[in-house]
Amino acid sequence: MTKPKLTREAGKTLAVDALYIIVGNIICALALVIFIVPNQIPLGGFSGIAVIINHLLPMVPFGVANLALNLPLLVISFVVLGWKFVSKTVFAVIGFSLFSDLFAAFITFTYTDDLLLATLFGGITMGFGAALTLSRGATGGGTEALGWLVRRRWPHYSLGKVIFVFSCAVIVSGALAFGDFNAALYAAIMLFVHTRVVDAVLYGVNNGKVLYIFSAKADEIAKAVIEKLGRSASILPAKGAFTGEQQSMLMCVVRRNEVGNLRRIIKEHDPKSFMVIAEAQEVYGYGWKKE
């Protein structure tokens, strides 16, 4: 049986994946060397443990520690979850580890003038680099893999909860290792900035709000939405579970800055309406981003 050949399109996709992951690794490594390690800001995840090891045992480079921590777990993930799950992540972990030690050896510039600024810019640059890596289906390694393995054994635990608990434990451990509990607070700020930047880069301006409006005047509201906001909507039949009354549900997706105007329109036409506002992570189609 012959092996399937790599098509030109597939090869191009792999090349783009590799380029994004390498650039993301470079940016994350620069953030680590310039902002994070010199200011002893704890990180979450396995990279945070590697920073602690490097601090307590300076003869062990960060990249070596990070690789040593991640590889056993990635091997287990390969056996349990399959190569498709870990292939890009292995590439990302090795690249991040190598670039971190390379930059630490040759880059002498570090920023230590203002701890808060170092925290903010560390979070911004780390978030941007991580988003580039995540956009091509790779992850930072250990924490995510650990989360999936835990969920394999205990499916009722959410992936986000496992990662959050583990990251908090590592951050607290880092504060203890550095002997500065304020470091944990700065780490929390950096984690918040990091996640916000990741969301902004991955989803950009294509995220918005989806509104579910239960109203007897759904047709009037829909007409006003089209005329005043230039948006469309869908009207779906609905039935009140308590009252048993038939009514309509209006579903409308708008940008964040349009929510206020939409709420005013709804209030004008039906003050007794019931409304639910939820996050729309990504929106594609006419008037939004095209796939």
Image (cartoon, rainbow, N blue to C red):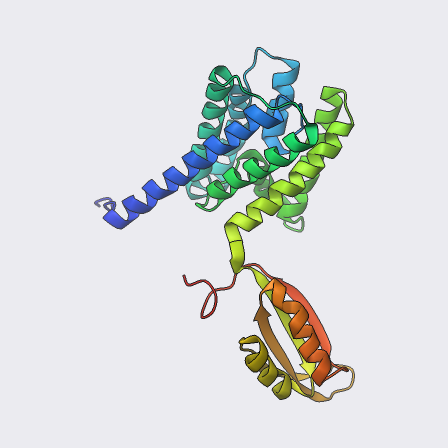
Measuring from the top left, give residue 121's x and y in whole percent.
60, 35
Residue for point 61% across, 44% down: 195
Which image quarter is the C terminus in?
A: bottom left
Measuring from the top left, give residue 169's x and y in whole percent.
71, 33
Measuring from the top left, give residue 181's x and y in whole percent.
78, 27
**Residue 258 left/right relative to 93:** right
Using the image as rendered, state which of residue 270 and residue 281 is in the foreground. 270
Does residue 87 appear in this view? no
**Residue 165 left/right relative to 131:** right
Using the image as rendered, state which of residue 105 and residue 147 is in the foreground. 105
Residue for point 75% across, 34% down: 185
Q: With respect to residue 167, does 63 lie above or below?
A: above
Which residue occupies the extreme left position in the image?
Answer: 2
Q: With respect to residue 103, does 134 lie above or below?
A: below
Q: With respect to residue 80, does 109 lie above or below?
A: above
In this rendering, the count of numbered labels is: 0
Does residue 133 appear in this view? yes
Q: Quadrant of residue 56?
A: top right
Measuring from the top left, give residue 89's x and y in whole percent.
47, 37
